[in-house]
Image (tube, rainbow, N blue to C red):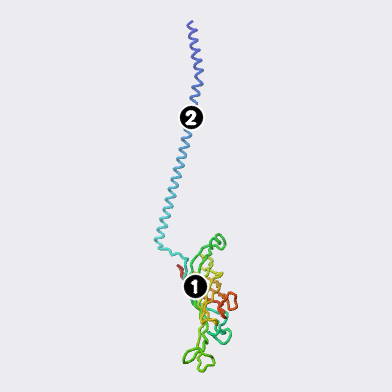
Amino acid sequence: MKSQKITMVLAGSLAAGIAIAPQVHANGWGKHRQAATDAGHIEELEEQLRALKQELADLKAHQQAHHKEIMELEDWKKESGPIVQKGRENFLFFRGGYARMMTDRAQDILPSPGTSKGHGQNGFYIGAGFEHDLSHDLFGLTEGTALEGTDLLGEVMFEYKRFAQGQGLLTDADEGGIVSPLAPGSKQETSTVTQLTISAAPKIRFWRDSMIRPWIIPVGFAAHIISPPSDGVTVFNPGLMFGVGTEVNLWENLYAGVDFRYHVTPGSESSLGGVEDTDTDGLTAGGYIGFGF
């Protein structure tokens, strides 16, 4: 009887152990897997932290190198002194050279420069002008093209031209009044043909960064004041101006150049209505020197 009881207790204990064993095994495996997952996350975070520290170290080294370059550049500027930049935004120039009228004024009553055709057409001119930069790329038209570096300028200029000095009006030798060529004691006066021109025009200049820079004036406005007056006793005649030239940067902001300009004005037979019986068409060719600022 006692042996049967012992056997039954052992059997019950064994059954209970068999029933509990799977649960204990499952709980132990879950804890082991969770621990492994947590360890993996920790290693991943540590790796990201190491990468972040390396990036911060690289950024700090780059900033130090950049700061060093800036300090070296500042030292170089101090040692080299002030930098004078070439080029110009505005330009003041002085001109001079050869001038020619396309039509002689020998047939005019007042000047009568000569007795033969062609006399008095040649002369000289002097003048000055001012330029101002309007656009560095023709308002975007030349940007990114073969004409990049083309400037648009605005020019205002005046010039004085002197031509022949010849015969003028006949005056009375004593009283100085104008008389007939047949009057006794008449005196022949001299008359100098001159012209003052004031113009305003757009100017297109090429090769901005080059030492030699050509330019053109496609068309501009010019006003001419002539002396002596025309046969219609008028002195003012407007017209158009065309020009071409080139300039050289000699030193710093000092420039020298040559130019050719042609003036077209309405004549007495023009529908535009010019100076009465006087043609003021002409040309100039010469040189100039200027200062950029």
Position in image of residue 126 (x %, y %): 49, 77
Q: Earlier in the sequence, mark 2 or mark 1?
A: 2
How much space separates mark 2 and mark 1, taking CA atoms?
91 Å
Q: Amino acid at mark 1?
A: Met
Residue situated in front as seen by the camera: 258 or 67: 258
Quarter of the image where the C terminus is located: bottom left
Total labels: the figure holds 2
Residue marked by disc 2: 34
Residue situated in front as seen by the camera: 77 or 84: 84
- Could you tell me if residue 23 is visible in this image? yes
Residue situated in front as seen by the camera: 56 or 132: 132
Give the structural element (helix, strand or loop) at label 1.
strand
Q: Is residue 118 left or right of residue 43?
A: right
Give the structural element (helix, strand or loop) at label 2.
helix
Badge 2 crowding class, 10 Å Cα cut-off, few under 14, some 14 to 19, many 20 or more, is: few
Q: Amino acid at mark 2?
A: Gln
Position in image of residue 73 (x %, y %): 42, 57
- Could you tell me if residue 124 is visible in this image? no
Where 210 sits versus 119, above or below? above
The answer to whether the residue labelled 2 contacts the one labelled 1, judged by CB atoms less than 8 Å apart, is no
Position in image of residue 97 (x %, y %): 51, 77
Badge 1 crowding class, 10 Å Cα cut-off, few under 14, some 14 to 19, many 20 or more, is: some
Q: Residue at x 41, y 63 (%)?
A: 82
Question: To which quarter of the image does residue 121 belong?
Answer: bottom right
Residue marked by disc 1: 157
